[in-house]
Image (cartoon, helix red, strand yellow):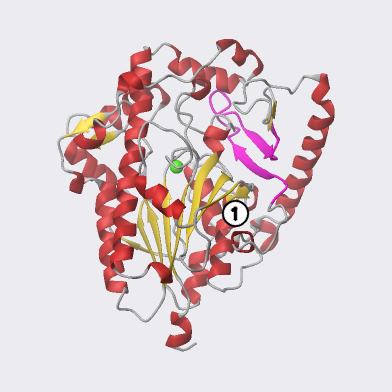
Amino acid sequence: MTHSETRQKPNVLFILTDQQRYDALSCHGHIPVSTPNFDRIARQGVRFDHAVTTCPLCVPARQSLLTGQTVIQHGLFINDHTVDERTPTWGDVLRNAGYQTLSFGKSHGINQGFTVVDPPYGTYYDHQAGALPNRQDQLYDWTPAAWPHGRTVVTSEEPVERFFDVLVAEQVKKQMRDLSHSSEPWALHVGFFYPHPPYVLPKEFAELVDVDAIELPQFDRSELETKTVGQRNMYERFFDLPDQQKKQMIAGYWGCVAFVDYCVGLLIDELARLGMEEDTVVCLCSDHGEMNGEHGLYSKFSSAYDAEVRVPLVWKWPRHLPAGICDSSLVSLTDIMPTILDMTQEHCPETCSGISLLPRMRGQTDDEHRDFVTAVTGWHEYPDLRPYGHMIRTRTHKLVHYMNDTCELYDLEADPSERVNQWSNPDFKEMRDSLQTMLLNDIFYQTAHSRSSLL
Ligand SMILES: [Ca+2]
């Protein structure tokens, strides 16, 4: 391929935040902070407001983002890093097609197909430790007993420029400046740490949210009688905390949402300044959500509520995609890889099970993108706090089948907050049977198309 042919390919700026809920964008609805940069990308492109992760945990979700495989298919159910290098990622495909592929910031070691640029993920701790020399033990002890400490906002006296996500953004900006002179197209994978805890923030972001104005999500404790043992145990971890501390934890999350929005703004401003907007696909998403007090829960990986499994997903590519569209199709994170490869006109490997969103974004099809999405949550070795379950979600219903624990069925139209478990309601028997059959058939399909069967 000649340079001129190669240059017609768009660049790809893939921006991944960590633990950002689907509704943590001010363009989605009212939240305690504003996110002008997320909103700007959405205004200039297509936003999917029903994008669902394959698993509400870093590594399983990130492997799905890179390979287009479900968790059953890629086999990484928890945060281990035994990736099968034979499974092609979209980075591998683009690199083989002549792209420069580079990974910046937090990747959790899931960066096959990309050259990792410093500072690698581990240096996050060095930077934050410098900002908070006396608070490390509390802040970086992520065992459940220590969670409330790491979730209370901590004001750092360090300037914004010292924070890991800003260092990452500055590095990406420099790289984009260098690449603007290159004849080769590029694909940058940018991993920001926030809004994942600990909630250490520079002063201007730490003080952004009025803690007293935070309203705790409504929750009736009797709801737990029909939920999993794991969820009840997780709830007890937080039940005794004073309301003020819970409000501080929630405020900390929103402060981090505003902070990561600021970091995203640094990138898209530079892209515009370099005049590369029309040559560059921007994809913004997150690996999973955060309970943030809903159902009395915090963190993730203990349920399959929408707060955990739905994520923001926005695409921007001026002159090639429509602007200001919000699409409520069900989308899986496995759909990212085929969409990027469709936009770059590269063949998507057979190992990928996702479906390209490009025809839908261009208005070339009216078909439902997906009838359902699936996800895996929890792990069989952690039944006390992380019950292991498989979820199937349609536009109207959600079923979660847990191993050796209470199962769940929600009518999402009548009960969008997922409070009333209809699993044992005889009126829902037909729906339950139907969803169980769909889920089982899909698990069979995924198992038959897992890495061991394909490679
Ligand atoms: Ca994560």
Residue 234 visible in the current orientation? yes
**x%, y% of residue 222?**
60, 10
Is 46 located above or below residue 35 in the figure? below
Please give left or right for residue 175 compared with residue 327 in the image.
Answer: left
Q: Position of residue 272 (x, y in %)?
A: 32, 64
Find out whether residue 367 is within the magenta segment. no
Q: Quadrant of residue 196?
A: top left
Residue 56 drawn above or below residue 235 = below
Of 84 and 133, the residue lying toward us: 133
Q: Quadrant of ligand 1?
A: top left
**Tag 1 residue:** 334
- Relative placement, left or right, of 72 versus 214 is right
Residue 199 point in image, percent of width and height: 31, 33
The residue shown at (48%, 66%) is 91
Q: Residue at x 60, y 63 (%)?
A: 362
Q: Does residue 110 show up?
A: no
Which region of the structure is painted magenta? 370-399
- Is residue 377 part of the magenta span, yes or no? yes
Callout 1 secondary element:
helix
Number of numbered discs? 1
Residue at point 64% right, 52% down? 73
Please state which of residues 233 and 21 is positioned toward the viewer in this rendering: 21
Q: Quadrant of the C terminus?
A: bottom right
Q: Is residue 39 above or below residue 384?
A: below
Tell me the kind of residue under disc 1: Thr
